Image (cartoon, helix red, strand yellow):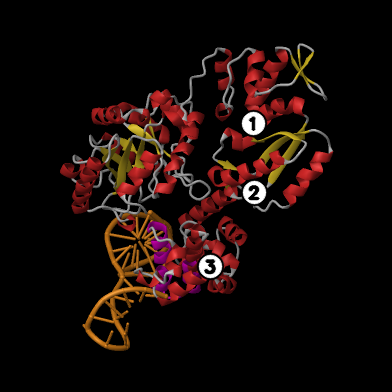
Amino acid sequence: MVREDELIKILKNIAKLLELKGENPFKARAYLNAADIIKRSNINLEDAVKGGKLSEIKGFGEALQKKITEYVETGKLNYYEKLKEEVPQGLFEISSIANIGPGKARKLYYENEITSLDQLEKACEQDKLKNIKGFGTKLQELILLSIQHKKASKGRFLQEKTTIEAEKLLKEIKLISGVQRAEITGDYRRFSETLKNFQILISIKDESVRNKIKALIKKYDSEIPLDLEFTNDDKFIWYLHQTTSSKNFNEEFEKLAFSRGLSLKTDSIYFNNKKINLKSEEELYEILKIQYVPPEIREDIRALEKAKEFKIPKLISKEDLKGVVHVHSNWSDGKNSIFEMANKAKELGFSYIVISDHSQSAAYAGGLSIDSVQKQHKEIEELNKEFDDFKIFKGIESDILTDGALDYPEEVLKSFDVVIASVHSSFNMSKSEMTQRIIYALMSPFTHILGHPTGRLLLARPPYEVDIKEIIRAAADYGKVIEINCNPYRLDLSWENVIYAKEKGVKLSINPDSHNSGTITDIFLGVKVARKGWLEANDVINCLGSDDFFKYIKSL
DNA sequence: GCCGTTTTCGGCCCGACTGTTTTCAGTCG
């Protein structure tokens, strides 16, 4: 099995390394282009190599064919390994800072003896960069911000990226004889956006089991650290609950539990001085006579207050979702055809999909010209005839231009069923300008949904400067919907702001923003964000059936 | 490094932005 993602990463890194070496920028672009081809197209690399079909693909010349073949056959690329040795690590790191490209990185490294991020940080703090031609006070500030963000992200991992690994490890632990119960707990179970480790709680029969687990862990090969905690089975549920909950929540919960007759001793849990073995967290809540609090919302004590009053709403679940909003097709920068995207959504049990490719200004992402829009609409109309009980809606992800305008003239905007408006350019505006820009887009009668409202990329890019609360209030005023973008790097709107949006009466749409049919399932990550934001099914517009969804959109 | 052809070398996407300039180079999407 070819690690396609890995190859894409290698090709991108080669491009960057070449730029840093100061080679012909077009050579670098050829590698970027190759990475892009692999990402967007449907080529099965293994088959293409075996069948000698690589040469048929535009963009894969002699050199790239050779390299791709080498990678497919050996899982490695010698050229890349050599290149890594030629380019200093420090130089590579420096160029990873926002607003530092290859040009500035080279200047710092070779002409100013700044050979690491630490040195770069110090130089900025000591105000030394402003003397270098091309640098100034403002850039110094931006560099510091970027370094800070990088530091804060260090040692943290995206929740979604860790899931498969975590579940696999857990399964293996459970198979060890003498392991009674085991769960991944902590941030993972509460669904925090990023994690620093896997916290695993295990109840064991006796001490000998520990060694068996340790032997298993020795074979564990991952960059994500493990934090194992052992307990006896009587206390398993208590500790599962404790380690899942946030600190604040837990403190209040313990107070309540102890005041209502629970006590914790070394051997077991006692209720009214009687030993108990809890089977589930639900049982724990039951004996305390309060409503069950799902793990996702054990963040602050408001949840506990509501639980005492039995007023925790029925949170949204996967099964409530009826349609998929915001996916890209190969008409812009997606990998699959409209048919393939629709078919996949149907297979997953959804009853409609909103195709929303990029708009004309997004040239880098193959944004649709007016002519293409019209052709795409014809294709959708034809496809709709082929599907029973499934509907494809004509959507667009329209850029919000710098002045807040949408990206097509009115007569074109009118032709879409659904318009999602998103910012994709000029991130460095002032807070008030950016806020105004987005509010202006919300005021357009053609806008239905605001896409990824803060533009953040988890662990990679902070949100653009924007007053998100003001935007949420504006969405409420103009009756517009806000997206929960489910791309694992975005999860934007964040759950904290989802809570605020609900308070203000704003409806949300849980959108996967998929660029291929395999990531439509990202939509289920969004359900977790929504749950963490206390949403119920009736807060989310794609919980509506196809007809009601369309009616709702048209009422905006 | 790729492509295409005016066949073996020249052009490759480019506009907006910005911090630094005082006309522009580097970065970004």
Query: Farthest left residue?
Result: A411
Instruction: Return the x and y of residue A159 as percentages of the image width and height.
Output: 56, 42
From the top left corner, tell me how far across and down residue A418 is, in percent. 27, 38
Please tell me how crowded label 3 is: few (under 14), some (14-19), or many (20+) other residues with Cα within 10 Å.
many
Task: Determine if the magenta segment contains residue A18.
Answer: yes
Q: How crowded is mark 1: few (under 14 residues within 10 Å), some or many (20 or more)?
A: many
| Separation of residues labelled 3 and 2 (CA atoms) | 33 Å
Who is closer to the viewer here, A40 or A17? A40
Q: Name the residue under label 2.
A: A224
Q: Earlier in the sequence, mark 1 or mark 3?
A: 3
A215 lies left or right of A311: right
State left or right for residue A94 relative to residue A242: left
Whether residue A399 is visible, yes or no, is: no
Amino acid carrying label 1: it is Thr
- Front position in the image: A540 or A111: A540
Residue A108's label in the rendered image is 3
- Mark 3 or mark 2: whose residue is earlier in sequence: 3
